[in-house]
Amino acid sequence: MGEVIDFQSGGYRFIKGVTQYSGGVAALPGFRLERVRFATPLPLKEGFAQIKEIIGAAGRPLTAFAACELRSPAPFTEEGFVAFNSSYTETLKAWGLIDTGLNPVARSNVCPQVTPPLVPSIYAFSYTVHSAEAAPSFVVSGSAEVPEGHAAYRDHIINRGDLSPAGLRAKAQFVLAEMERRSGLLGFGWKDATAVQVYTIHNLHPFLADEIVKRGAASAGLTWHFNNPPVLDLEYEMDLRGIAVEHVA
């Protein structure tokens, strides 16, 4: 994940990523990102139908769909994650989002530890709207403690199986650095974030002050979701965004 590409038909640019998602998105000049969170996560089919309706009502093409926050019942096996991603991207293909051969849409996909959804569901999404004088806006995709681009995650997980304070700190350090790298590629940093989200069921407190707060990652507060990352053996994930206009539907 390194190249930043303009996606003119969507009104945003994106970090070239992997098949299932990009590394992050930022609105192009003349556009702003808006975020919609569903009051209750909606199953994928129903959620995509609602998204289509909302984007259409705003007078925007479906290619304005820029970022998606998902909730799944439980962490996937590697094989299950591949199968899920294949199903998920079918809608993106139908909406003309992958016509270039690349997936521009940013994404997080995490698994609530308590009262999870029965099926993979959409928690929130972001899309572009016209705005002549909009402040810059962006969404950085979620990352857990593993480099992207490998055929399988398991052999590349940072400190796999180590849930000690030191092991969790190392996982957090990797993820925080990846958030900084991705946001930097888009021209942003922690100071530009309106929200930073962390997803883990483990104790943050031993490294909260010196790894998260001191580097500025909690300047707008920190939203902790008691969720697991989407693949077995991953333990810690984060994402961030800078969006001035948000809705609850």
Image (cartoon, rainbow, N blue to C red):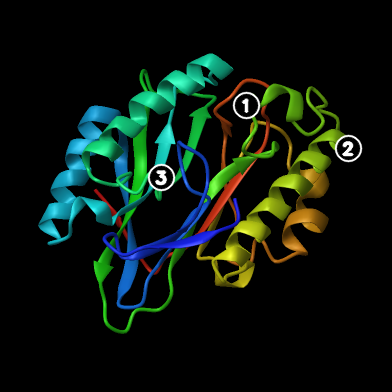
Residue ID for mark 3: 103
Residue 241 point in image, percent of width and height? 49, 59
Q: Nearer the viewer, residue 99 or 221?
A: 99
Examine the rendering and report whether any part of residue 43 can be seen: no
Q: Nearer the viewer, residue 84 or 161?
A: 84
Please give the name of the residue rendered at 21% of the width and 31% of the height, measured from the top-left corner: 46
Q: Amino acid at mark 1?
A: Ala
Horizontal side of 117 relative to 45 (left or right) equals right
Task: Please say if 224 is above or below 137.
Answer: above
Q: Which mark is residue 151?
A: 1
Horizontal side of 65 relative to 103 (left or right) equals left
Examine the rendering and report whether any part of residue 8 can be seen: yes
Q: Amino acid at mark 3?
A: Asn
Separation of residues labelled 1 and 2 (CA atoms):
27 Å
Separation of residues labelled 3 and 1 (CA atoms):
18 Å
Q: Residues within 10 Å of mark 1 (few under 14, many from 20)?
A: few
Label 2 or label 3, whichever lies nearer to me, is: 3
Q: Residues within 10 Å of mark 3 (few under 14, many from 20)?
A: many
Task: Please say if 90 is above or below 218.
Answer: above
Q: Which mark is residue 166?
A: 2
Give the mark, 3 or 1, whose residue is nearer the N terminus. 3
Q: Which mark is residue 84?
A: none
Give the mark, 1 or 2, whose residue is nearer the N terminus. 1
Q: Tag count in the figure?
A: 3
Separation of residues labelled 2 and 3 (CA atoms):
35 Å
